[in-house]
Amino acid sequence: MQIKTLILGAGAAGLMCAAHAGPGTLVIDHARAPGEKIRISGGGRCNFTNLGTEPARFLSQNPHFCKSALARYTQWDFIELVSRHGIAWHEKTLGQLFCDGKATQIVAMLLREMEAAGAELWLQTALRELTHADGTYTARLERDGRETVVQAQNLVVATGGRSIPKMGATGLAYDIAGQFGHALVAPRPGLVPLTFPEGRFADLAGVSLPARVTANGTSFDEALLFTHRGLSGPSILQASSYWHEGEEITVNLSPALDPAAHLRAARKGAGKRSLTTELRQILPERLVGHLADHLDLSGNLADLSDKRAETLSESLRNWTLRPSGSEGWRTAEVTLGGVNTDGLNSKTMASKTVPGLHFIGEAVDVTGWLGGYNFQWAWASGAAAGRSL
Ligand code: FDA
């Protein structure tokens, strides 16, 4: 079978690319259903983009690479598409847009767009062999136990990263990159809970509070959640993308209020109140109990010197912790690293060295913050490649 374009992977990026690539396009995926990560994303409502999308919200060895694609297919373009398909949506927080209904509406919309463009989709299809000669890609595919050989002028690799192998993630994009001489930026788990030695926060499991978490100089002000295994919540997931094994993170447990100033003010009117009682006004009760095992929280407010108040405040606002690891690929929402952007054209996602070869979506070394940015990259890079084919 001769076609113009073969797209590997019917996820967010692959479907978007097919919708722009048009007739003569075949998308294949080994999964039973397309867009499975879209379906489960955002608690089933899909945080499909972010109003604040800008290049600074993406991590990459080359921070400039994402600019062109993001500028040429913006969050507003995707909002227009969603609205045109009659999908109701709302802003939840921090510019994050979610469907009012189910995330499957987004998958259905992409399938409609893809079909309208004249592209075809084969599910439960495995790639057995891939070669490239005389300007043609030859893919040996297996579908329903039968083998089909497809020849295409263009190959788009949209098979995503390594996160959540249970959902069908594989390293196929990296293998193909290697086969065609493209370098990788070492893939590692991103947007992932951080772990600590067993029992470190067991007494706090379930406690959540607003916090500022800093890793490698980048800070995030969002909720922090203590778990049986360590730390999670949006602030930790965000910071995890900036954290490397063995490094420390800093947690500010009271980013909005200066505890020293609060304690000094409280001391004036309620000197007999115990320090722990007053701290419970600004921190969750269980956390105060936990901190009392590690810090001196004895005595009444009247006994608290300004100096001690400052020292305590500093401990609460500059809590330095060294995670023992992360929950890894099992729960990571994204993959950091991937196909090195040095080898790709930022306008078309095409290989600079191998004609017709493209890499899009999470397979590429571009990773967004939490909050709809990763889907926006999938849409933008998919559209960039699709329009160029
Ligand atoms: P994606 O992973 O979507 O698609 C890759 C496709 O390739 C899959 O269909 C897979 O089956 C297929 N494939 C893989 N290997 C193959 C092989 N060997 N042969 C054939 N097919 C193969 N982002 C966001 O912006 N907002 C959100 O709300 C969320 N929420 C979220 C929740 C959870 C639980 C996860 C795990 C992730 C998110 N994300 C997110 C991240 C987002 O899902 C992710 O960045 C995009 O789906 C990436 O799109 P891609 O198309 O690049 O890969």
Image: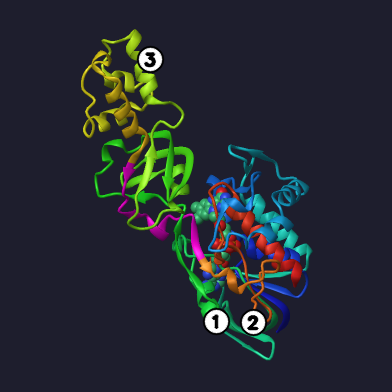
Corner quadrant of residue 299: top left
Residue annotated with mark 1: 181
Vertical position of residue 335 compared to residue 49: above or below: below
Question: In what quadrant of the picture does the C terminus appear?
Answer: bottom right
Residue annotated with mark 2: 354
Does residue 32 appear in the picture of this structure? no
Mark 3 crowdedness (10 Å alpha carbons): few <14, some 14-19, many ≥20 = few
Q: x and y percent of residue 265 in the render?
A: 38, 15
- Residue type indicated by callout 1: Gly
Question: In what quadrant of the picture does the N terminus appear?
Answer: bottom right
Q: x and y percent of residue 10 in the render?
A: 62, 65
Q: x and y percent of residue 37 in the render?
A: 55, 56
- Residue type indicated by callout 2: Val
- Residue type indicated by callout 3: Ala
Whether tag 2 and tag 1 are in contact, CB under 8 A, the answer is: yes
Q: Which residues are magenta?
A: 320-337
Viewer-nearest residue: 131 or 194: 194
